[in-house]
């Protein structure tokens, strides 16, 4: 099978030759020898047809890379907001300790994960935090207001550690009566800091747009924050 040849021309417009699309480095057709002899350096020929194809390939590659990046970011989109970036902006609030705080260090650790579960019906739990993972249970009715409140609430669980409660006797899964100690996650300190966090978020980012299935604790927190401003 004959090798397909392309026309290679000198950049000084002194003629051209036919050569393979990928000539060897030591192929004399790759260089314009008369021009090279004049200036004392090798003058490399170019193939206009190949350059045009490479330009089209680069443009297509850029478009493909952009779509791939958009697709990768789409999994973080909630109410047309990038939830991951929004979470990091909220973590910089003074109540969470800023860039030197534990919250910022935790969410930027490679082991930390933000998980978004999308549903069609409302759920009792809007979010969940395990310390190294924040999970959002989103629905089509979510707006910026709900996203901000849930993210601030879950970030606060990293900021404020749970408190050990009172002991009580229980019969868990029919395994017999045993004495267990309850854990209080939403302590008075937690709610006080949530009020501060909401006030700081309004001052820095303004009032959130939209509304959503805000829980009872969130309505109380918002009302207390607005009343104390």
Image (cartoon, rainbow, N blue to C red):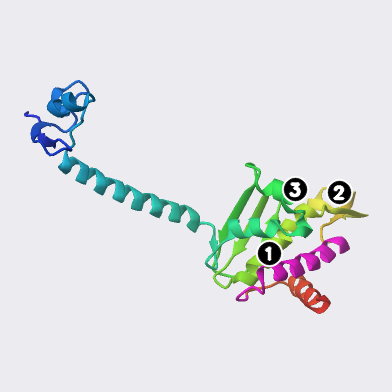
The magenta segment: 187-211
Could you say which is closer to the camera, residue 78 or residue 193? 193
| Residue 224, placed above or below residue 162 | below
Number of residues whose C-alpha sits closer than 10 Å to that of mark 2, classed few (under 14), some (14–19) or many (20 or more): few
Q: Which residue is mark 3?
A: 100
Asked if residue 113 can be seen in this view, the reply is yes
Q: CA distance from mark 2 to mark 3?
A: 47 Å
In the rendered view, does 214 fall on the left or right side of 174?
left
Q: Nearer the viewer, mark 1 or mark 2?
A: 1
| Residue 185, placed above or below residue 215 | above
Number of residues whose C-alpha sits closer than 10 Å to that of mark 1, classed few (under 14), some (14–19) or many (20 or more): many
Place of residue 10 in the rendered image (x, y in percent of width and height, measured from the top left): 15, 35
- Residue 183: mark in rendering: none
Place of residue 214 in the rendered image (x, y in percent of width and height, measured from the top left): 68, 73
The image quadrant of residue 38 is top left
Q: CA distance from mark 1 to mark 3?
A: 23 Å
The image quadrant of residue 44 is top left
The kind of secondary structure the magenta stretch mainly shows is helix
Asked whether the beta carbons under mark 1 and mark 3 sit within 8 Å of each other, the answer is: no
Q: Residue at x 16, y 33 (%)?
A: 21
In the rendered view, does 68 fall on the left or right side of 188?
left
């Amino acid at each position: 099978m004959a090798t397909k040849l392309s026309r290679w021309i000198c950049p000084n417009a002194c003629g051209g030759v036919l050569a393979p699309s990928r000539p060897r480095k030591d192929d004399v057709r790759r260089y314009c020898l008369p021009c090279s002899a004049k200036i004392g350096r090798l003058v490399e020929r170019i193939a206009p047809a190949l350059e045009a194809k490479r330009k089209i390939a680069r443009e297509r590659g850029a478009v493909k890379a952009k779509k791939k990046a958009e697709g990768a970011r789409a999994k973080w989109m909630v109410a047309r907001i990038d939830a991951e970036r929004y979470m990091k902006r909220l973590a910089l609030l003074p109540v969470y300790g800023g860039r030197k705080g534990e919250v910022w260090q935790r969410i930027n650790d490679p082991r930390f994960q933000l998980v978004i579960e999308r549903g069609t019906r409302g759920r009792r739990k809007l979010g969940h935090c395990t310390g190294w993972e924040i999970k959002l249970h989103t629905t089509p009715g979510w707006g910026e207001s709900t996203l901000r409140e849930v993210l601030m609430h879950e970030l606060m669980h990293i900021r404020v550690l749970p408190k050990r409660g009172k002991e009580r006797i229980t019969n868990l899964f029919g395994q017999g009566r045993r004495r267990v100690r309850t854990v209080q996650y939403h302590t008075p300190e937690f709610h006080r800091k949530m009020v501060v966090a909401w006030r700081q978020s309004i001052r820095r980012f303004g009032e959130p747009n939209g509304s959503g299935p805000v829980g009872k604790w969130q309505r109380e927190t918002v009302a207390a924050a607005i009343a104390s401003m």
